[in-house]
Image (tube, coloured by chain):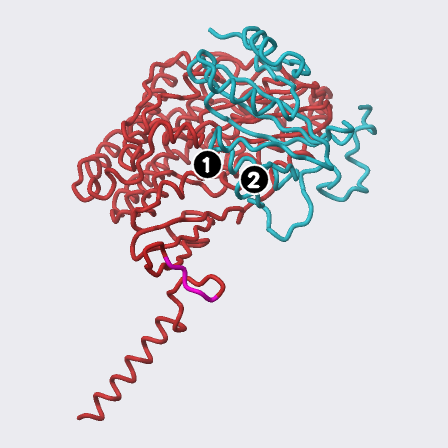
Chain colours: A red, B cyan
Amino acid sequence: MSEDISTQNTLTQRNQTAVMGPQVGNLALKGGVPIVSEDGRELTTLNLGPTHPSTHGIFQNILTMDGEKIVSGVPTIGYIHRAFEKIAERRPLYQITTLTDRMNYCSSPINNMGWHMTVEKLLGIEVPKRAQYIRVIMMELARIADHLICNSILGVDSGAFTGFLYVMQKREEIYEIYEEMCGARLTTNMGRFGGMERDLSKEAIRKIREFIQSFPPVMQEFEKMLNRNRIFIDRTVGVGPVSQEMALQYGFSGPNLRAAGIDYDVRVMNPYSSYQDFEFDIPVGYTGDTYDRFMVRNGEIWESFKIIKQAIENLPEGPFHADAPEFYLPPKQEVYRNMEALIYHFKIVMGEIPIPVGEVYHAVEGGNGELGFHLISDGGRSPYRLKMRRPCFIFYQAYPEMCKGVTLSDAIIIMSSMNVIAGELDA
Amino acid sequence: MLTNQEIADDLLSQFGDKIAGFEEHHEIMSVFTTVETAKPMIEYLYQHPTFQFQYLTDLAGIHYPDNTGGELSVVYHLHSWTNNHRIMIRIFVPIDAPDVPTLIDVYKSANWMEREAYDFFGINFVGHPNLIRILNIEEMDYFPMRKEYPLEDATRQDKIDALFGR
């Protein structure tokens, strides 16, 4: 009998060693000495990331913990840095569109069109109304897809998986509309300088109308599931609040800023692509906590939905691209038959189009905030310098301050509600 | 409605000969100034009762290898939300002593933006509490966005603008 017990003990001990790793595995060591807080408490270092499932992308946070509470955090980013700004200095302008896809890959049409509008501003191309409306429809669909992902993942991170799977179906429908427009789903490369590469097809219009029909009940159900859910509210209200001053200081923009109660939206402040034609509201929060960020995004989904409905109802007739043969890639069948088109095709593909010397800053309201392109051209085939203002990169630096003193599980929810996209963070 | 002219007049009366010039690109005015004046000017614009440039939109480094004595440039994009007005402040620093005072005490968001500019251009932001590389690996011993580092094979002949008459 006694022998049995001793064997059991040894087994348990062995198991524990296997689970805990070496003896000092859970102590924060700095030069071999445990880190101790001011009042003599031993602190733990915790690596959140780079491949933690709840970071939704590859970046690391080295957290110093006092038990369950976070004392400080040091974010390390750059794991998927692809040097877009450097690559852009060697590419013709139209090839840079594919780089912008890969920044915020949850809403790549917005990035594509932001870049196209920047170049159009530099080249002085006037885009026809119909193309502007098609752009608005695509950008707002992208915004809905972006916010759906962020909000449903917030549900997943707080333990409610159902909503995620439910709205994923709607994102799939949005991706099908993308497919109809440009053939791609995630990295879309949608549109051209001067408009769209093709008109809204009958099938695309049918899919958009179907989406308009079928989306509200799903969204209402999603809201019903979380908005007044006791558990969800307990988890999110008052977690990671951001005051207006802090939001301004840290350069917040987009839904995170509006959750703090500042109604800044590029679509309203500097309207582009005919946003002034549409009737929509800017949802704002009060305290800037996780719940407000969630609610602002939900509100924005409805507003985007409103814009899409207006745009598809009032879609103007006319050409879907500007008459700018030097910059707008001609249709393929023309290239095979027509000398002019072949010349322009060659010149555009080789990047030999005349680019004026100049400089332009253009900002659009991306999924996460103000997405800006600062393009400096010296008349060469590629930009002299292209600076992309990536909203994630700027507001993510507030994360250590936001998660100071909260528990680990709250820190994960805060990160989730900020919608940090690694591709945009690192560029 | 605030105009560029008003800001230019106000800045000229305040800083006078410290301003090297103005440029306007698509309605956004650039103010060229010296390294020493940039920070006081931004603080002035921040605290100005009507201008209120309280949002730092972006901070970009640029390398101009041919501009001797001012090879590196820093562009501050400021935005006044109360007036819905954008402005850029530009400075030039020599590449062998690229010292620029940090803006962290004015805008906290300058922290990572300055680290990024340091990482890619080697601009030394004096007073920055943690000026280390942010996107590249720490062991990197050069500043990759400078123009002397070509992206691909520098001997390639098919992408030279001069060959195409430019």
Residue at 31% from the left image edge and 33% from the top image edge? A293
Is A20 located above or below residue A86 in the figure? below
x%, y% of residue B127?
Answer: 56, 37
Q: Is residue B5 left or right of residue A89?
A: left
Q: Report the predominant secondary structure element of the magenta stretch.
A: loop
What is the secondary structure assignment of the residue under circle 2?
helix
Which numbered dot is residue A392? 1
x%, y% of residue A147?
Answer: 36, 34
| Front-most of residues A105 and B75 | B75
| Front-most of residues A242 and A416 | A242
Q: Do labels 2 and 1 touch, CB within 8 Å?
A: no
Q: Residues within 10 Å of mark 2 (few under 14, many from 20)?
A: many
Queried whether the magenta region covers residue B112, the answer comes back as no
Q: Which residues are magenta?
A: A32-36
Q: Amino acid at mark 1?
A: Cys
Q: Is residue A28 left or right of residue B44?
A: left
Chain of the residue that carries numbered disc 2 in the rendered image: B
Residue A291 position by quadrant = top left
Which numbered dot is residue B115? 2
x%, y% of residue A94?
Answer: 63, 29
Which numbered dot is residue A367? none
Chain of the residue that carries numbered disc 1 in the rendered image: A
